[in-house]
Amino acid sequence: DQSAANPSNVVVSAEADFATLFDVYFGDETTEEPVQFMPGESVSHEYEELGAYTIRIIAKGAGVATTETTEAITVYEVTSPLEGALNPTEKAASVISLFSGAYRDIDMRTWRTDWSVGTLTDIDIKGNTTKQYDELSFVGVEPASPIDASSMTHFNIDVWTGTATQLRIKLVDFGPDGGFDGGDDSEHEITLNLDNGDFVQGSWVSLDLPLSAFTGLNEREHIAQLIYSAGPAGAATVYVDNVYFYDENYVSLTAPATAAAVPSADAGSVFSVFSNSFEDPAGVNYFPNWGQSTSYEQIDLSGNAAIKYGNANYQGIDIGEEVDASAYSFVHIDVWSADYTTIPFFIIDASGERPVDLEVNPEQWTSIDLPLSAFTDQGISINKVFQFKFDVGFSAGGTFYIDNLYFHN
């Protein structure tokens, strides 16, 4: 068994009728002593040089007779990751994400400033978007607006490299004036060396850096640049994912402590499906039996009702009648979740069903107005809307709360 991620590492096992012992020669030494192992066991070996080798295995039994086999292998250089970086596990509410498929990212001005030395390519590794920097000396990264990381404790960046022997991470705070070189800038760079074991080649590494280690940063409220560099300068390729700040001391909420904001829409322009502020249809069913794993509960938040959907995979709402939603411009919903930042939300009409993602701010009520054109532009009518659906698919088991679901102008 030869590791695809690290082809220099091989694991040998064997079986043969009547064998009681195996000798294995790995073929990388001129005067090689065999490594012995028993049936049912295995032995591993790390080659120090690239190249072609012949592994020779001899099976021995109780007598003098033996039998043997050989296996030709090639130890080659891995120049790119075969898998994407692992998904981070920090709670979304504790994170300010610059780039990660696990979180909602802030707006970025650029991932390669015009003064950078190195090329940038956005690539896909089995569905995982990754940034590839080639011929990297240094590269500047800038958010659209300065980041207030004063409540954060750590900076994380996941890297994969097969060539870099040094990595350097610099954070730059532009100070209260928000501008470069305004006299109140501060910065600090952390250097990581391969020889010191600070990272490894050929595997994804999470560089989880305490912000307290960036001692040269006078403030963390106006971070406007991230600069990462590699050595040997101009010769390294570095892959990057999961770039974010987070607070390790964050205590996650499990349920909303307060009710969603009272709607401001005029009752005369509203068709309500669930809200204390308006009249809901008499025949609405908030928990139709569609074979889902989702549980349902109405909860009270200081006198205001909200719906809790737990252990979620998908969930429908049956309005109990057909609604001509073409008379309205928007569908409104308030959502709270500690588990989901994106929830696919479907309008189901007699002409079909189409989804639009609800983008949820973690652990706080998010008030969302979706233009109904986002559904009709996908090719359905909304003249006979009779159901809604939430579908988190394979992200089963989480919880979300909803309130104030209505059509309005």
Image: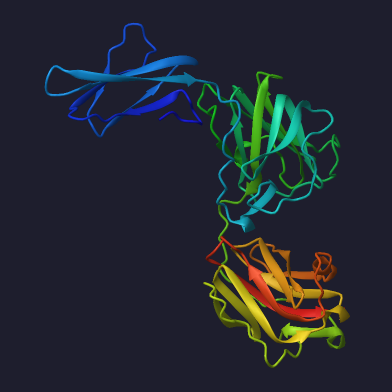
Is 125 positioned to the left or the right of 43 in the image?
A: right
Left/right of residue 255 with respect to residue 131 in the rendered view: left
Q: Quadrant of residue 306?
A: bottom right
Q: Residue at x 13, y 16 (%)?
A: 64
Q: Is residue 69 left or right of residue 403?
A: left
Q: Is residue 165 visible?
A: yes
Quarter of the image with the C terminus is bottom right
Q: Is residue 353 left or right of residue 162?
A: right
Residue 333: image x %, image y %?
74, 74
Name the residue nearer the viewer: 384 or 125: 384
**Total marks in image:** 0
Residue 340, above or below 204? below
- Direction bottom: furthest residue: 282
Quarter occupied by residue 114: top right
Where is residue 47 drawn, in percent x and y?
43, 18
> Please, which residue is most extreme toward the top here?
30
Residue at point 37%, 23% (across, down): 45
Nearer the observer, 295 or 376: 376
Q: Residue furthest left?
A: 63
37 versus 99 height, above or below: above
Asked if 128 appears above or below 58 in the picture, the reply is below
Colour approach in the figure: rainbow
Residue 262 visible in this rendered orientation of the protein: no
Name the residue located 39 percent from the left edge and 16 percent from the top edge. 54
Q: Position of residue 344 (x, y in %)?
A: 68, 65
Please identify the quadrant where the N terminus is shown: top left
| Residue closer to the observer: 187 or 66 | 66
Residue 156 percent location from the top left of the image: 61, 42
